[in-house]
Image: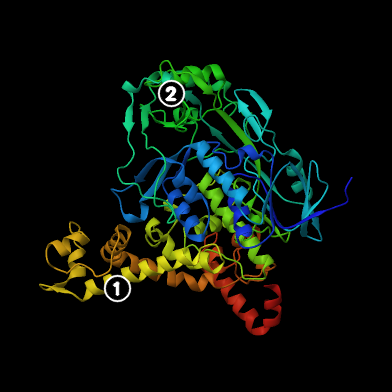
Amino acid sequence: MSNFIEQYDVIVVGGGHAGCEAALAPARMGLKTLMVTMNLDTIAQMSCNPAIGGLAKGHLVKEIDALGGEMARVADLSAIQFRRLNTKKGPAVWASRVQSDKKIYQFTMKQTLEKQHNLTLLQDTVTDIHITNKKVTGISTRYKPLIKAHRVIISTGTFLNGLIYIGKKSCESGRFGEFSSKRLSQSLKNEGFKLGRLKTGTPPRILRRSVDFNKVQTQPPDDIKIPFSRLIKKFPLEQIPCYITYTTQNTKEVIRNNLDKSPLYSGIIKGIGPRYCPSIEDKIVKFPDKEKHQIFIEPEGLTTEEMYLNGASSSLPEDVQQDIMRSITGLENVQIMRYAYGIEYDFITTDQILPTLETRTVSGLYLAGQINGTSGYEEAAAQGLMAGINAALSIQGKDSLIIKRHEGYIGVMIDDLIIKIPEEPYRMFTSRAEYRLLLREDNAYQRFVSYGHNIGLVPDKVYDEVMYHIKKVKTEVKRLNEIKYQDMTAAKYLKRPEIRYNDLAEKNIIKPSADNLNNNDINQIEIEIKYEGYIAKQQAQVKKMRKYESWKIPQSFDYKKVVGLRSEAAEKLMQNKPVTLGQALRISGVNPVDIQLVMIYLERLNRSDKKTLNRLL
């Protein structure tokens, strides 16, 4: 046996959507990186719905792209349907979504990883994380007793002690047909990490030719394709429709008559499932007065007859699933190719991670994706990217990159996870972002491109192009505020709801801009002018909160010493260990008066013993 021990800068455990971004980032930043995954053939597999983006999730994908991540580019290249959502509402909640060819997405991402300089891929099972003096030193796998590393990122998805349920039958699995990771879960427990238990599920896949398309609604792709990535100018794949159908009264009856066979309702499954994405049996039980529920029939790709039933996840037995599916309009003769199942898995409670996604107790160990209690490809990829970036910056001796809540949805998500331990799988919503008018899809590059460029993930050409467009928009907004029209400026005239930017030139109010403005430039000009008051109000709110966000709190701070602080607040603060006063203010059970008391105590500590405070920080 060889005594050679491999050494890497960064090791990434897991090859899902979090793992892909976590591995690419440090490799592109010049660090020797290893990705270890159980099966190289399932890298970036779309285990659930074959789509990227959606409400709030599209914002995350745009931000990933602006930071130099990969998901947006691969989504565009594998897209078989582009759609814009919420376009009848305000720009803050406009969202992009693509239906993907799941195999093209998977293989495009896999090839990207294979071609990446500084990145090695290994098919193996990680069994242990090596930790010495509270510092990570490497991993063990089934076939390698030790692989050394300066930093390790765990992104294991639902594989940590995963259990799959179909009816009252269960099996150990991280995904149907694949082994779960029990030893790694136990290894983390042995190191003192607190683990929780969550549940999610997936719907059946059906045979296309068994659907009666005369009874369902067609949902065509948009005529205009708006890419996620600035790097993509052409779309290689054919665009095809999705379909919409509904449950019936018969669906209700079948489910109600078989609830005793559900592992969820019989108490077999202990983990908590996603409230926002309930199983079909959950919908019937929790919304008894609703006549019907919407089901989306989505193609899984251009070269397969499998279709995905979005909205029909279940963990009921196979024969009951068959009866349920055949009670749905247009699916009376449906053939199920893959049955739905529920899955229960371990996650590490998020009071144990820092804003960098490094664990609080073990230096150099980072967590990303469903191991942090989240759900969704986009949420996972965003965490993977941030963990990869921060692991690399740490090795390079540079400051961490922490996205703040007012800067992006990535910041909102990570901040939420740290101050609110997930009691159900966490999913991003626009409603979670209090400054959402500032965090639109269209300005993701303006918000993030400097970060991506400074750390080396966004090339000079893309950065210069974004800066050029930012300058064009500012110049044109300034021009419209200076041009007089009757008793107002052109900008004030544009504020009228029925007036669009192009109307100004058509009405001879302005001369066409000398700059070559594209559709995105025009869209941003309209938003900045039409929503000027709302944007200014949110910017003022951000400015007010910044004083709290800049106040750092030592991790060893003893809240019991703060005179007058309520015991409930002290307990909540001790449990969550907020990094800043801003985070502390967002903890449930902590009020502004509590924060003022902590601030006063920190000020006194700073004046009386600055050396002690700096040492604690």
Query: Picture coordinates of residue 27 (x, y %)?
Result: 63, 58
Mark 1–mark 2 Cα distance, whole angstroms, equals: 52 Å
**242, above or below 468, in the image:** above
Question: Quadrant of the rendered structure where residue 297 is?
Answer: top left
Picture colour scheme: rainbow
Q: Is residue 499 left or right of residue 221?
A: left
Q: Quick one: SS at disc 2?
A: helix
Q: Position of residue 399 (x, y in %)?
A: 62, 70
Residue 182 percent across, percent down from the top left = 74, 38
Residue at image point 42% right, 45% down: 54
- 276 w.r.t. 531: above or below: above
Q: Nearer the viewer, residue 504 or 156?
A: 504
Residue 391 left/right relative to 488: right
Q: State the quadrant of the C terminus.
A: bottom right
**Amino acid of disc 1:** Thr
What residue did someone put label 1 on?
475
Q: What is the secondary structure assignment of the residue under circle 1?
A: helix
Q: Is residue 422 visible?
A: no
Tell me which corner region of the image, top left, top right, bottom left or bottom right, holds residue 246: top left
Q: Quick one: 172 or 293, which is closer to the camera?
A: 172
* Residue at the spot of label 2: 208
